[in-house]
Image: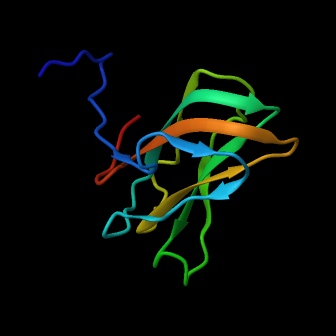
């Protein structure tokens, strides 16, 4: 296998959505177990395949135990609001942010949407990074 890069190493991640996910209203996704917390931040990739509506905000939430510890927004884990498709975004948290064991994808809206088809991938940094 070959891959091209831009001077930075490849980022191998894990899907937070089961392939393409379709939401027809604001939705709390299913938690994904990463087996342990990490202390060096993360990057998240969003790919929006199709969108019908006014706006949708996609964000990442975390929990230490899949919900008994209530899910909370990851600091720096919200993508810019989606208003059209196709589109993609990459966001990165602080390199010293602790990220909890479970992550999930949540969609919200202020003016509504009827269909949002998208996928999100997470890359958790297991060691200190120099970005």
- The part of the image, by quadrant, that contains residue 101 is bottom left
Query: x, y percentage for residue 61?
Result: 58, 60
| Residue placed furthest toward the right | 111
Residue 75 against residue 46 in the figure, above or below:
below
5 vs 20: above or below: above
Q: In screen coordinates, is 50 left or right of 9?
A: right
**Vertical placement of residue 72 versus 81, above or below:** below
Q: How many marks?
A: 0
x%, y% of residue 15?
Answer: 39, 47
Residue found 47% across the figure and 65% down from its top: 31
x and y percentages locating residue 109 in the rendered image: 79, 46
Instruction: Please state, as top left, top right, bottom left or bottom right, where the N terminus lies in the image.
Output: top left
Q: Residue furthest bottom?
A: 68
Closer to the camera, 126 or 78? 78
- Please determine whether, in this image, residue 70 is positioned above or below residue 34: below
Q: Is residue 2 left or right of residue 94?
A: left
Horizontally, is 100 left or right of 127 in the view?
right
User: At x 27% / y 30%, what residue is drawn?
Assistant: 10
Identified at 36% across, 38% down, the residue is 130
């Amino acid at each position: 296998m070959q891959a091209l890069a831009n001077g930075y190493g490849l980022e191998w991640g894990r899907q937070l959505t089961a392939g393409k996910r379709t939401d027809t209203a604001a939705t709390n996704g299913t938690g994904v177990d990463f087996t342990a917390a990490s202390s060096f931040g993360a990057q998240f990739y969003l790919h929006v395949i199709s969108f019908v509506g006014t706006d949708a905000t996609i964000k990442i939430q975390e929990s230490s135990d899949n919900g008994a510890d209530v899910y909370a927004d990851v600091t720096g884990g919200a993508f810019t609001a989606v208003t059209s498709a196709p589109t993609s975004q990459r966001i990165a948290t602080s390199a010293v942010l602790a990220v909890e064991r479970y992550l999930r994808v949540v969609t919200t809206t202020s003016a509504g949407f009827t269909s949002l088809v998208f996928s999100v991938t997470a890359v958790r940094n297991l060691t200190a990074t120099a970005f």
